[in-house]
Amino acid sequence: MKAVVLNKKGQPDRLVYCEVDRPVPGEDEVLIRVHAVSLNAADYRSMKMGMIPKRKIFGADIAGRVESVGKNIREFIPGDEVMGDLASYGFGGLAEYVSAPEGLIIHKPKTVSFEYAAAIPMAGVTALQALRDKGGVRKGQKVLIVGSAGGVGTFAVQLAKYFGCRVTGVCSTGNIQQTLSLGADEVLDYTKEAFTRDGRKFDLILAVGGNYPLTAYRKALADHGTYVMVGGGLSQIFKSLIFGRFLSLGSKKMKFLAAKANRTDLEFLVKLVEQGALKPVIERQYALENAAEAMNYLGKGHSAGKVVINIKG
């Protein structure tokens, strides 16, 4: 099969489009013919940090069709359209075929395209768990989403509105209209103004990256408010883990989310997409042979939505 494989000696890109052996599914695995895969920060950050998948193939969020199943599989049969997040199972999505345990995939509705399905899992579940589980989001709250234009941010804006909140997004000038179109009540252009300067308060702050100090986020929280950090660079994550506990003394809470793939959460999100209450935002699409270019683009940190790789069937 064709795949995009990490080759540390590859020039000029370390991701090389080449021929590799097709995976052989185990007794508890499903072999999937991949139709679309989306890239996440987890892909390029893992590559940058030297955390390489066993098969040296990145790509966690996949959507495709079941090719064959192991003898212990009961939930899926060949021909089923499926989707899921394989980050906890060694990635492998940047290929024509990938094997996965049935516990990490769900049935893809016919009404949801392969591209949309691939765009949902990691970013959508992260946004949901950040708002609902860590943030305890409630109807009527004032929610600030820093980084409202990226993969997680675009889902977070829509989900916060779904939960009945007043949403303020923070992004660059070129992404203001997109954030408004997703339902945000207000958008702050971080190149022109800082939410930390005008004294406004928020019940829940979701930071998807962003280089503001933790003390600035805390100052912008209302009493009994919650700050949740998702993603970010290693230094940001380290500071959040070390200092967040001390800054959480009192009524304001500073939290960090390490999202986990969850079938129930993914099924909930897909239902919202089917109902028209949630729409994945896909900024760019690439062919599999151009996955290295896609990864380089995503790594610059300026994508306005999801980057999806289409794999010819």
Image: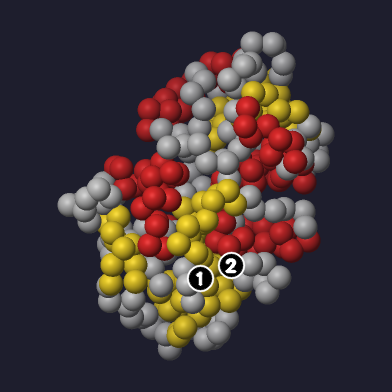
Q: How is the image coloured?
A: secondary structure
Residue 218 in picture, x, y percent from top left? 59, 19
Residue placed most toward the observer, 9 or 53: 9
| Residue 240, placed above or below residue 69 | above
Residue at 78%, 61% (x, y): give it: 275
Instruction: Please give the residue where the numbered disc 2 appears in the rendered image.
Output: 114
Instruction: Find residue 146 and report its horizontal and vertical position in percent.
Output: 60, 30
Among all residues in the image, which is located at the extreme bottom?
71
When the figure is inspected, residue 247 is found, relative to residue 116, above or below; the finding is: above
The answer to the question of whether label 1 and label 2 lie on touching residues, with beta carbons closer than 8 A, is yes
Label 2 sits on a secondary structure element that is: helix
Measuring 45% from the left and 85% from the top, which residue is drawn there? 68
Name the residue at 56% across, 27% down.
254
* Residue 104 coordinates in the image, percent (x, y): 50, 67
> Which quarter of the picture shows residue 249?
top right
- Residue occupied by mark 1: 35
Query: Which residue sits at x=57%, y=41%?
Result: 304
Query: Percent x, y for residue 273?
Result: 71, 59
The amino acid sitting under disc 2 is: Phe
Q: Nearer the viewer, residue 249 or 116?
A: 116
Q: Quadrant of the N terminus?
A: bottom left
Residue 300 against residue 312 in the figure, above or below: above
Mark 2 Cα shell of 10 Å, populated few (<14), some (14-19), many (≥20): many
Give, as a three-letter code, the residue at label 1: His
Is the residue 258 above or below the residue 288 in the image? above
Residue 134 appears left or right of 236: right
> Tag 1, which secondary structure?
strand
